[in-house]
Amino acid sequence: MTDDELKKLESETQEKDEFVFMREEIKSRPINRKKLMRNTMVAALSAVVFGLVACVTFALLAPFVIDRISGNEKEEEVKVEPVVISFPEETVEEEMTPEDMILTSTDPAPEIPEGTQLDEEEIKALISDVKFSLDDYQNMYKTLSDVAVNAQRFIVRVTPVKDSTDIFNNAYVRESELSGIITESNETELFITTKYSMVKGSNDILVTFCNGVSARATIAAYDTTTDLCVIGVLEDDINEVTRETIRMAPLGSSTSYSIVGMPIIAVGSPLGVYRSVNYGIITSNANKLNLTDSVYKQLYTNIYGSSSATGVLINLKGEVLGIIDTTHSVSDTRNLICAYGITELKKPLERMMNGLDTVYMGITGDDVPAAMVSTGAPEGVFVLSVEMDSPAMRAGIQSGDIIVGTPITRINKFSDYLILLRGFNQGDTETIRVFRSSQGVYKQIDLEVNFSEIKK
């Protein structure tokens, strides 16, 4: 074949091959549905298993890893149990009677050496030589001011918040302000003593410490007789700086007759304004307040103050001698500060802070006067009045009766009665022995008193 024929033949063959390729059909492999479903299920199950393993592993290892990264080991939580609060027992000093003031000693008067006696002119000359400068006067008040400033560490501002309405029945929030004292702590709560009538019914109670830090408080216990209450602030709500700044109020003694004439400082809100201060002396502590199931000494001062004063009286050592309360002020000394003596308040405050209730009998009384004892009356508690619908009235106790205790326990004075009352529990029924005068003769009567109520 010639070259032209060969070329022609190759060209025809190539055209046939290209034509065959272009018409060739490509078919996909048939799908095996069962095998596809099985593979899908295996993949899904594997994903679930791996996910569960990952979650469990993370839950187990996460705390360990976090502790390792932060460098802190997990501390075991320890629940702090409140401790029992107890004030030291105080020996109550009796009032000095007129007989005590009479010198009965037979010892000879000490001889005064000759030459030491001064006449009136010499005394006047010595006094005239003593002069106080302005600096002396300023230093004296600076010393008093330092005592008052240091006392601010146990003084707090109490702000009760209450919902109220005006005369047009429009609702508004009312805030008032008073003072309180940091009294004690049971390691879970910090207890503050303040006026009950001003905080009761509050929606919220805010306590502000001397460094300006505030915390919320709740009423822990109250006593309607003295109108005092204890409010508690959780220890966890008080930061470390505040803990180091504040301190507990040191409680002194108000029983000694020697405190009359003693210099004192009124701190808190004696002028009705928080952190107001005034100086003076105690003018009397002889007055007794015969209240329901209690007797309190009232401290009178020459300090002018507000009729809504709150706070405490402290001595020059910074000890609390009394809690200010002007409720029982007499009309002609309405604006002179007076207070409950702290000695008689210690036990009620102690019981309130420990969550203990005192049973309620419902009498006001006092020691039987010596004049009555001398005419044949027994020693005990003379009942001045009986509250309406009280356990005492329901039992038949009357004004003028003399309570001498129970058939087992004998009492001779009102302080014994208070100890006896604290030994009873709510729901107890006790036999109370009284003597009642009938035509000048005292007859013994045993009465059953049901202590179904508690004193708040």
Image (cartoon, rainbow, N blue to C red):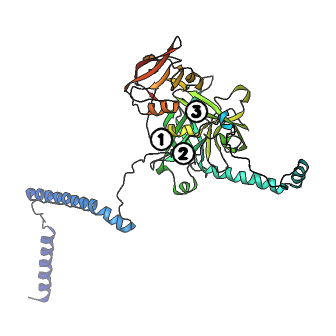
Looking at the picture, tell me which residue is in the foreground, 335 or 98: 98
Mark 2, Cα crowd under 10 Å, few <14 / some 14-19 / many 20+, is many
How many numbered tags mark residues here?
Answer: 3
C-alpha distance separating marks 3 and 1: 19 Å
Residue type marked 1: Met
Which of the marked residues, 2 or 1, is nearer the chain's N terminus?
2
* Residue plotted at (68% across, 43% down): 106
C-alpha distance separating marks 2 and 3: 19 Å
Looking at the picture, tell me which residue is in the foreground, 61 or 36: 61
309 over 443 or under it: above or below: below
Q: Position of residue 33 (x, y in %)?
A: 10, 56
Helix, strand or loop status at disc 3: strand
Q: Main secondary structure of the magenta part?
A: loop
Residue contact at pointers 2 and 1, CB within 8 angstroms: yes
Q: Position of residue 23 (x, y in %)?
A: 14, 67
Q: Position of residue 152 (x, y in %)?
A: 63, 49
Mark 1, Cα crowd under 10 Å, few <14 / some 14-19 / many 20+, is many
For label 2, the residue is 183
Q: Is residue 350 left or right of residue 99?
A: left
- Looking at the rendered structure, which numbered label has been put on residue 296? 3
> Does 63 lie within the magenta span?
no
Residue extent of the magenta highlight = 71-95
Looking at the picture, tell me which residue is in the foreground, 206 or 39: 206
Q: Position of residue 81 (x, y in %)?
A: 39, 49
Residue type marked 3: Tyr
Mark 3, Cα crowd under 10 Å, few <14 / some 14-19 / many 20+, is some
- Looking at the rendered structure, which numbered label has been put on residue 353? 1
* Residue plotted at (16% across, 69% down): 22
The quadrant holding residue 199 is top right
Residue contact at pointers 2 and 3, CB within 8 angstroms: no
